[in-house]
Image: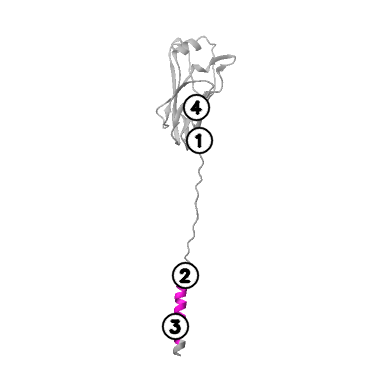
Amino acid sequence: MKKQFVIAALSWGAIVLGSNQVLAQNSNQVNTSVNINLADVISMDVGSVASGGTVDFNYVNTTDYNSSKNVTVPNSLVIISSKNFDVKVKSEGANFVSGANVIPVDVLQVKAIAGGSLTGTLNEVTLSTNDQVLVSNASLGAKQSLNIAYSISAEKASKVLLGKPKGTYMQKIIYTATAL
């Protein structure tokens, strides 16, 4: 009987110790990988003032034709980019057009001006049909705004605009943001 008691005690101890080992084996760990896949992005916000906006220069009297005119448009462009970028500007056509009458687009100066949140080298260009860098090496970021000033000099007003038939002369200006 003593032998049976020892065997029973050892068996019971093995069961108790064995169950602890089984519990330890059930606590294995597993892991999962989480991936964040990024793509480069660059976009001009459709809420930008320049998106479908209008800039008006009104010439109604002799003072207008003898003076420089400037129109500043705050938040003209709102840009998001995951890389540094350039902003370029060009006109869709070679002339401002009113029916059969034309005015060359080079009467207009376009200038990126301080005051918005976009940082980079701000430039002024004479409008043409060729892409020209308005802002170079702008910093990446979200919802960066750019203020743009449009101007026609007194000299251009008196030498190019004066004498043209009355009317509203129109041309589209195209802005492009290009990642570097």
Tell me if I can see residue 49 in this picture: no
Q: Earlier in the sequence, mark 2 or mark 4?
A: 2
Give residue 22's position: percent from left, percent from top.
Answer: 48, 71
> Within the magenta stretch, is there residue 6?
yes
In the image, the segment drawn in magenta is 5-24
> Mark 4: few, some, or many residues within 10 Å (few <14, many ≥20)?
some
Instruction: Give the labeled residue for mark 2.
Output: 23
Q: Find disc 1 in the rendering and name its residue.
A: 42
Residue name at image x 46 percent, y 84 percent? 8
User: Which tag, 3 or 1, sits closer to the chain's start?
Assistant: 3
Q: Earlier in the sequence, mark 2 or mark 1?
A: 2
Tell me the element at label 2.
Answer: helix
Residue 115, image x and y in percent? 40, 28
Which amino acid type is marked by label 2?
Answer: Leu
How packed mark 1 is, by other alpha carbons closer than 10 Å (few <14, some 14-19, many 20 or more), is some
Q: Amino acid at mark 3?
A: Ala
Mark identifier at residue 9? 3
Check if mark 3's residue and mark 1's residue have beta carbons within 8 Å.
no
C-alpha separation, residue under disc 4 versus residue under disc 1: 14 Å
Q: Which of the two residues, 96 or 141, is positioned nearer the viewer here?
A: 141
Mark toward the start of the polypeptide (4 vs 3): 3
Q: Is residue 23 above or below residue 161?
A: below
C-alpha separation, residue under disc 2 versus residue under disc 3: 21 Å
Q: Quadrant of residue 10?
A: bottom left
Disc 3, SS: helix
- Determine if residue 11 is in view: yes
